[in-house]
């Protein structure tokens, strides 16, 4: 060995690589010399990744890993060596590690239980063990380490007993990592583990960080819904205990407005924010039915306490749980509102401050119920609270008022406009800048929403706004209020924007704050004046482009870096691998706001935005992958508006010198950039937005795409289907876990809904492509069919089945001949799906069945009888015409009509056609309604005997259908069909015997009957309905005292009878 290592430990890489290539020789050397020393030097020289390559994949050196652990854990440099072992494990495949369990398990156990090994070494060994556990593939293999949990907890208690809280905190971080990745590992000993964590969290002698880490560990288990749904509820009285711990911890952190804190630190201490977030996370993870009742009971006790800290903590908790408990709180509205209102007059400003925060959260998460049901209590209380002697409370009150105005223009606020206006106007001149800015901002919103109601009050704001323009030091947020100015003959929009852009803000404002306020003013002004904003673009676009292209200052922190900057709430954090990127939030807000304003300007100016379209697009395309969510959201929204602007400019010839090919090229760029960004989007919400934007853009420019541009779209839709199907399978697996319950099912609904949206939009995109490209798209459909057919499986979701059906329906409609090749597969599936339990699946299947009946006659013939049988099941069902089943019913009726029309020779038409007739009219699916009612009209027009009946016995039903369709307006039939029905009725009524006519009118409703008669004979009869009485207005210009002989005598007789019974004849003036 000395010859190999050399006296100076020469570079070992070449020699060790040679040894690895000759493993048999190396093993013999290990037997002759000290194998531990060789292994240790070999590991350090090679590094963990190369050493792992030696172990795997053929595992020809199985002794090495146990030897490494043994020599690492007995070497003088224990921690350093064990860290290398930790790295090594991460490079070895989980299946390969299974072979080492029996050897390494006792080694791990001995290390953790050895009293002679110090805590730092044990913690490193624990890290190695947990990495090993997480790398092992199956849960069964991981369970073999369950007996190590007591040793882990003993280690934790040992560290705390010896006052080594730094070591305990390190172990906490390791356990939290394990809980995130393998929460089920703690299932069997859940009561012991969680109980220990509760004891630590409640122990006041421990450091705050230690107690909070115990809370965080438990919260990780609470949130592990995906892997262990409902597991945490197995702990007895878990919610009661955990909520009480959080509430008690919160007491020590509540905000005291009497302490001198700068505005941006109010209510913003890290420990307070952490505990608030825990309450927010708890309510979202467990749901309102679990948390709500327990919270109400404990909060009432805290609110009744004589101290100010307990009521304050209770109000903070109430504000945080409202999102997850909104349904329960809405049902108990009076209870929760009374809790808050009773505290608004508390002697301590901290309680009043917290009550305002609760109201603000109610406005966010219980809207519109809270606003509509409680405004009469809350708004007057807010107006009164604006006189509070605490600046902090005043700002919170103003923000609560803003909550009432942030969405729409609620009419009920007109009751309080003058009171709100007077108080806000007063506070907009406050000596404290933050109060002044907040009041000015909310006053702007109030004036914007209610300027019609203000009268002279609205005008009173204008001098205040103008005064800010001439003052040297004005709050920057007053710039936003410039958007209230409405340009008139003396003030042009361009002048207003020039004034806004020239303002510099007060000395208290930094550059970001000033710029943000200007951007908000631009957005509000553009929204207000629409296309009149065009002259302002030359002034504002440079600022918008500059801010959108802004590269925010960032700090990249490695795992070993100083993370003190992470405690600053003004910093946005993005984790990339093991590193953390820290960015100033105000810079990101400025960038996001610039993107939002670009969306607004493009939307309002439409084709007039053309001069800026291409530069805007070139700036925004890279931002589709930007790490800050808001930037991506606004950038995605911009795509369709830019494309629409370009299309309108192209159609109207607004782009001088530009060719149609430029728009075509631009369209392709938009689509392909969206597709590329879609593939990398990590957030489901934005993913859905991107899909929707893509389908809208395809609607705008689809025909302009070429076949080369189709390929990436189709490939991405394949990826979308695959990933979403996998997500659906995982959600389904979660439902099968032993801890799954009704509350967990409720929490899964949101996730399922988002996956359903993804499938729906993917289907919409494919249908759009089929409609646009028709036969050109067929080769791509052949590929997609491999993804679509499995979506009809029994275990698939409703949306998956429905999406697959709708895509194939689109192919049938647009390329019926090409769809023949799939009939052997799809037609039996369609027939089966016609009687599916879900009405949406039934609707899509029946629609496809109708298309087959219409377009593929010879192929469909063998299936006609089965199709009628399945249609009959739908239309004869007891609840067939209930709202949830109406669309499926309408498509069943339409499909039956097509069978009658195209395959009459194969059915017993004398029986089937009357059944079909009795199903009419249909009113849910308006497209099918128009088709079916036109079909009926055509059959009547050609005097179809099986439809009319040998002696017109079916005509009364036909007449009632026509009456409903004609009186139903343009929605149930085209204008052509309606006119045809009217002419047919006029002619048929002349031929009918009196008895048939009387029977015919008896099937129509009285009001409908009279309206129909006025339509059939407009020059003779007008009908007025008033106070449940019908007035017939006879045209006296005919110089006849009774209806003229041009009307059939049978109708005259019926009219006279109706007039005598219930009507009054009024001569026309």
Image (spheres, helix red, strand yellow):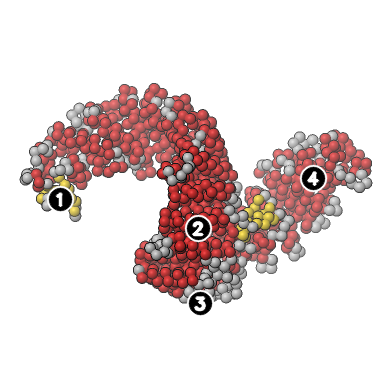
| Quadrant location, the N terminus | top right
- The residue lying toward the viewer, choosing from 4 and 508, is 508
The residue positioned 48% from the left and 30% from the top of the image is: 776
Nearest to N terminus: mark 3 or mark 2: 3
Nearest to N terminus: mark 1 or mark 4: 4
Mark 3 vs mark 1, CA separation in Å: 68 Å
- Above or below, 252 against 659 in this view is below
Nearest to N terminus: mark 2 or mark 1: 2
Q: Residue 389 got which mark?
A: 3
Residue at which label 1 appears: 1031
Residue at which label 4 appears: 47
Mark 1 surroundings: few (<14), some (14-19) or many (≥20) residues within 10 A: some
Q: Is residue 1043 left or right of residue 119?
A: left
Mark 4 vs mark 3, CA separation in Å: 66 Å
Mark 3 vs mark 2, CA separation in Å: 43 Å
Mark 3 surroundings: few (<14), some (14-19) or many (≥20) residues within 10 A: few
Mark 4 vs mark 2, CA separation in Å: 59 Å
Nearest to N terminus: mark 3 or mark 1: 3
The residue positioned 31% from the left and 37% from the top of the image is: 930
Tell me the element at label 2.
helix
The residue positioned 78% from the left and 58% from the top of the image is: 119
Residue at which label 2 appears: 539
The location of residue 700, given as percent across then percent down, is 45, 42
- Above or below, 488 against 887 in this view is below
The location of residue 581, given as percent across then percent down, is 65, 55
Q: Are marks 1 and 4 in contact (CB under 8 Å)?
A: no
Mark 4 surroundings: few (<14), some (14-19) or many (≥20) residues within 10 A: some
């Amino acid at each position: 060995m000395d010859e190999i290592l050399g006296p100076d430990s020469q570079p070992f890489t070449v020699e060790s690589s040679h040894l690895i290539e000759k493993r048999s020789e190396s093993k013999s050397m290990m037997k002759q010399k000290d194998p531990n020393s060789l292994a240790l030097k070999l590991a350090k020289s090679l590094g963990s990744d190369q050493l792992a390559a030696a172990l795997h994949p053929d595992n020809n050196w199985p002794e090495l890993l146990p030897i490494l652990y043994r020599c690492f854990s007995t070497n003088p440099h224990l921690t350093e060596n064990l860290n290398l072992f930790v790295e090594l494990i991460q490079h070895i495949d989980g299946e390969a590690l299974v072979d080492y369990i029996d050897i390494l398990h006792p080694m791990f156990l001995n290390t953790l239980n050895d009293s002679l090994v110090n805590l730092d070494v044990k913690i490193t060994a624990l890290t190695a063990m947990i990495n090993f556990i997480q790398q092992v593939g199956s849960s069964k293999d991981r369970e073999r380490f369950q007996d190590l949990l007591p040793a882990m907890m003993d280690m934790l208690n040992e560290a705390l007993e010896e006052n080594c809280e730094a070591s305990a905190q390190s172990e906490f971080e390791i356990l939290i990592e394990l809980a995130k990745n393998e929460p089920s590992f703690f299932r069997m000993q859940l009561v012991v583990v969680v109980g220990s964590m509760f004891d630590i969290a409640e122990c006041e002698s421990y450091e705050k960080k230690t107690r909070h880490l115990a809370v965080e560990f438990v919260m990780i288990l609470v949130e592990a819904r995906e892997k262990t749904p409902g597991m945490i509820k197995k702990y007895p009285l878990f919610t009661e205990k955990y909520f009480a711990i959080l509430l008690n911890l919160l007491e020590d952190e509540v905000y005291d407005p009497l302490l001198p804190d700068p505005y941006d630190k109010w209510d913003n201490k890290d420990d307070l924010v952490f505990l608030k977030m825990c309450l927010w996370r708890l309510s979202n993870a467990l749901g309102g039915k679990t948390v709500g009742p327990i919270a109400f009971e404990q909060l009432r006790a805290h609110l009744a306490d004589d101290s100010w800290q307990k009521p304050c903590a209770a109000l903070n908790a109430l504000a945080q749980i409202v999102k997850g408990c909104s349904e329960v709180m809405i049902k108990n509205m009076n209870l929760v509102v009374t809790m808050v209102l009773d505290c608004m007059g508390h002697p301590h400003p901290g309680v009043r401050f917290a009550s305002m925060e609760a109201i603000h959260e109610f406005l966010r998460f219980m809207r519109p119920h809270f606003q509509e049901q409680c405004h009469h209590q809350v708004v007057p209380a807010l107006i009164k609270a604006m006189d509070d002697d605490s600046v902090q409370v005043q700002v919170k009150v103003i923000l609560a008022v803003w909550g009432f105005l942030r969405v729409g223009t609620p009419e009920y606020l007109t009751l309080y406009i003058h009171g709100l206006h007077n108080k806000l106007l007063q506070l907009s001149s406050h000596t404290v800048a933050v109060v002044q800015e907040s009041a000015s901002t909310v006053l702007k919103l109030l004036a914007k929403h209610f300027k019609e109601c203000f009268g002279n009050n609205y005008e009173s704001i204008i001098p205040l706004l103008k005064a800010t323009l001439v003052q040297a030091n004005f709050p920057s947020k007053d710039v936003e209020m410039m958007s209230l100015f409405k340009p008139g003959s003396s003030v042009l929009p361009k002048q207003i924007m020039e004034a806004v852009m020239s303002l510099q803000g007060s000395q208290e404002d930094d550059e970001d704050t000033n710029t943000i306020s200007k951007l908000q003013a631009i957005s509000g002004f553009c929204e207000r004046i629409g296309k009149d904003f065009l002259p302002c673009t030359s002034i504002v676009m440079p600022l918008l482009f500059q801010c959108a292209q802004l590269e925010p200052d960032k700090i990249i922190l490695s795992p070993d870096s100083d993370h003190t900057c992470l405690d600053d709430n003004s910093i946005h954090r993005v984790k990339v691998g093991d590193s953390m990127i820290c960015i100033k939030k105000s810079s990101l807000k400025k960038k996001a706001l610039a993107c939002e304003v670009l969306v607004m300007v493009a939307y309002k100016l439409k084709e007039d935005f053309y001069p800026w379209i291409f530069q805007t697009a070139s700036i925004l395309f890279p931002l589709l992958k930007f790490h800050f969510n808001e930037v991506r959201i606004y950038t995605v929204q911009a795509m369709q508006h830019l494309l629409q602007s370009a299309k309108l400019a192209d159609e109207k010839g607004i782009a001088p010198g530009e060719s149609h090919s430029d728009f075509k090229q631009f369209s392709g760029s938009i689509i392909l950039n969206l597709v590329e960004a879609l593939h990398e989007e990590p957030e489901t919400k934005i993913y859905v937005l991107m899909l929707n934007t893509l389908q809208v853009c395809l609607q705008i420019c689809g025909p302009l795409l070429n076949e080369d541009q189709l390929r990436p779209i189709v490939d991405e839709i394949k990826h979308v289907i695959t990933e979403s199907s996998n997500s659906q399978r995982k959600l389904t697996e979660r439902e099968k876990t032993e801890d799954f319950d009704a509350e967990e099912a409720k929490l899964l609904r949101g996730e399922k809904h988002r996956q359903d949206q993804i499938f729906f939009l993917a289907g919409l995109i494919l249908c759009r492509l089929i409609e646009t490209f028709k036969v050109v798209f067929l080769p791509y459909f052949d590929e997609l069919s491999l993804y679509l057919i499995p979506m009809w499986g029994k275990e698939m979701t409703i949306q998956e089945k429905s999406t697959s059906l709708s895509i194939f329906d689109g192919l049938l409609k647009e390329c019926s001949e090409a769809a023949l090749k799939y009939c052997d597969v799809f037609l039996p599936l369609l027939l089966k799906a016609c009687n599916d339990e879900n009405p949406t699946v039934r609707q899509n299947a029946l629609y496809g069945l109708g298309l087959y009946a219409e377009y593929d006659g010879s192929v469909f013939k063998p299936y006609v009888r089965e199709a009628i049988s399945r249609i009959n099941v739908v239309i004869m069902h007891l609840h067939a015409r209930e709202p949830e089943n109406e669309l499926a019913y309408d498509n069943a009726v339409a499909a039956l009509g097509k069978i009658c029309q195209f395959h009459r020779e194969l059915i017993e038409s004398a029986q089937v056609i009357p059944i079909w007739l009795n199903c009419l009219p249909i009113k849910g699916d308006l497209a099918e309604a128009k088709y079916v009612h036109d079909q009926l009209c055509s059959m009547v027009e050609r005097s179809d005997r099986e439809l009319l009946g040998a002696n017109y016995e079916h005509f009364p039903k036909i007449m009632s259908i026509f009456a409903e369709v004609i009186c139903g307006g343009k929605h149930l039939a085209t204008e052509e069909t309606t006119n045809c029905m009217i002419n047919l009725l006029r002619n048929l009524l002349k031929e009918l015997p009196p008895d048939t006519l009387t029977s015919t009118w008896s099937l129509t409703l009285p009001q409908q009957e009279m309206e129909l008669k006025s339509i059939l004979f407009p020059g003779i009869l007008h009908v007025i309905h008033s106070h449940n009485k019908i007035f017939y207005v006879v045209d006296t210009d005919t110089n006849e005292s009774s209806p003229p002989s041009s009307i059939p005598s049978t109708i005259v007789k019926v009219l006279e009878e109706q007039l005598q019974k219930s009507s009054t004849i009024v001569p026309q003036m």
